[in-house]
Amino acid sequence: MNILLKITGFFVLSAVLFMACNKPGQTATTSSDSTASTPVSDKIVFIDIDTLLSKYNLYLDKKSELEAQSKTAEKALSGKIEAFQRRLAKFQQEVAEIQQKANTIAPIELKKMEEKYAQQQQNLAKEEESLMKQRDNAAMDLDKQLQATQKNLQEKIDVFLDKIAEEKGYDLVLMKGSSGSVMYGRATLDITQETVTRLNEEYGATKKETEK
């Protein structure tokens, strides 16, 4: 599988924003009327995960960084594979030519050629195995980096949501978007932009400190 193609699928964070957070000392209000089965709360908000990821600078920076690394690895491997395929084609052509004129070659010389080409075939097989191993290792390394990045993003978002829920007194933060569970929500309940702004501010400050 092309290493770069793994980026797109892996970077779809699934349910990273869903978090129930009850404010200490506060419980959801319920109706004493037995016919009212749905409690009403003005402390439920939602975040659009697609919008957040498209504007969260940490996500965008990490995505660009990993894409660049995957392209570099893919380019290096492609060059090696192409060179190997040229050598393999040349080897196969030489063997075919020898087979065509085998009856005109002295048995001793023919045996030497057979031994020579048998050794070349073994070397090519080992080279092919090495290239496939390099490709697999590159893919595994990318997977590890993607998993670490996903974990880092989720932790940062979870910490932020815990903090903002405490500040604002939110009881529940839901997720809307391609992998979310909210089909509709009033615009007044959407805290996506506030979340993006504050996350980017925190990331920007951390980035400046790191670059000093």
Image (spheres, helix red, strand yellow):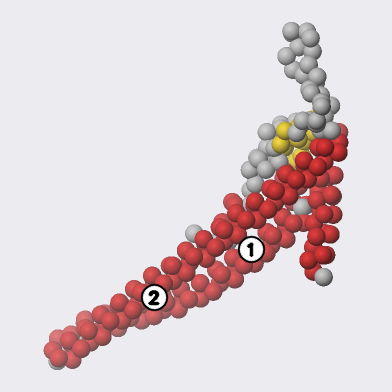
* Residue nearest the viewer, comparing 69 with 211: 211
**Which amino acid is tagged 2?**
Glu
Q: How far apart are marks 1 and 2 (CA)?
A: 27 Å
67 above or below 197? below
Nearest the eye: 208 or 84 = 208
Location of residue 161 by image quarter:
top right
Identified by mark 1, the residue type is Glu
Residue occupying image coordinates x 80% and y 19%: 29
Element assignment for label 1: helix
Residue 56 x/y as whole percent: 77, 52
Q: What element carries label 2?
A: helix
- Which one is nearer the viewer's eye here, 189 or 29? 29
Neighbour tally class for label 1: few under 14, some 14-19, many 20 plus, Cα within 10 Å: some
Q: Is residue 93 left or right of residue 77?
A: left
Q: Which of marks 1 and 2 is nearer the N terminus?
A: 1
Asked if residue 167 lies left or right of residue 112, the reply is right
Q: In which quarter of the image is residue 147?
A: bottom right
Q: Name the residue under label 2.
A: 127
In percent of the image, x 79 and y 13: which residue is there? Answer: 31
Q: In this view, does 52 lie above or below 32?
A: below
Residue 185 seen from this side: no
The residue singled out by tag 1 in the image is 67
Mark 2 surroundings: few (<14), some (14-19) or many (≥20) residues within 10 A: some
Residue placed at 70% from the left, 37% from the top?
A: 18
Question: What residue is shown at x 68% (from left), y 33% (from top)?
Answer: 181
